[in-house]
Image (spheres, grey):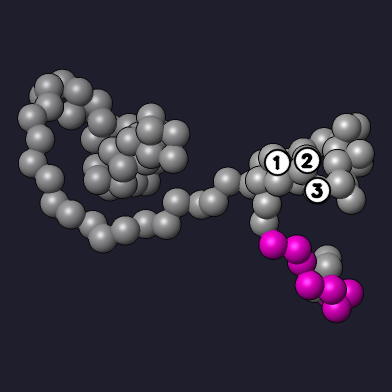
Amino acid sequence: MLTTEGLVPPPPRTLAELRADPTIAGDLEAALVQLIAPRRVPGERVRVNIMIDKGLLRLTDEAAEARGLSRSAFIEAALVSAAGC
């Protein structure tokens, strides 16, 4: 919205930095603060060799197929979710 009006958006700042800014500190008392987390950028794919329970692997394959994913994509999504990325 700022850029469509010809304004330059301010640089990102932490909540502590915003609270320390006397020009806006008072406005923050009743404000709703939105956290914007950076999106994880995929890195280089590497091949791994792991040992896993045969039945769990079967369930993983079934769940991946039901979602239209490969085994690798399903496991990667599960790891991302578990790690909170």
Q: Quadrant of residue 11?
A: bottom right
Which residue is the site of mark 1? 15
Give the Cα distance between marks 1 and 2: 6 Å
Depth check, mark 1 against mark 2: the one in front is 2
Q: Position of residue 78 (x, y in %)?
A: 35, 34
Which residue is the site of mark 2? 19
| Residues shaded magenta | 4-11
Residue 56 against residue 84 in the figure, above or below: above
| Disc 1 and disc 2 in contact, CB within 8 angstroms | yes
Question: Which amino acid is tagged 1?
Answer: Leu
Q: Earlier in the sequence, mark 3 or mark 1?
A: 1
Q: Residues within 10 Å of mark 2 (few under 14, many from 20)?
A: some
| Disc 3 and disc 2 in contact, CB within 8 angstroms | yes
Which residue is the site of mark 3? 21
Question: Which amino acid is tagged 3?
Answer: Asp
Quick one: SS at disc 3? Answer: loop
Quick one: SS at disc 1? Answer: helix
Quick one: SS at disc 2? Answer: helix
Q: Residue at x 71, y 46 (%)?
A: 17
Front-lying residue, 52 or 38? 38
Residue 34 against residue 4 in the figure, above or below: above
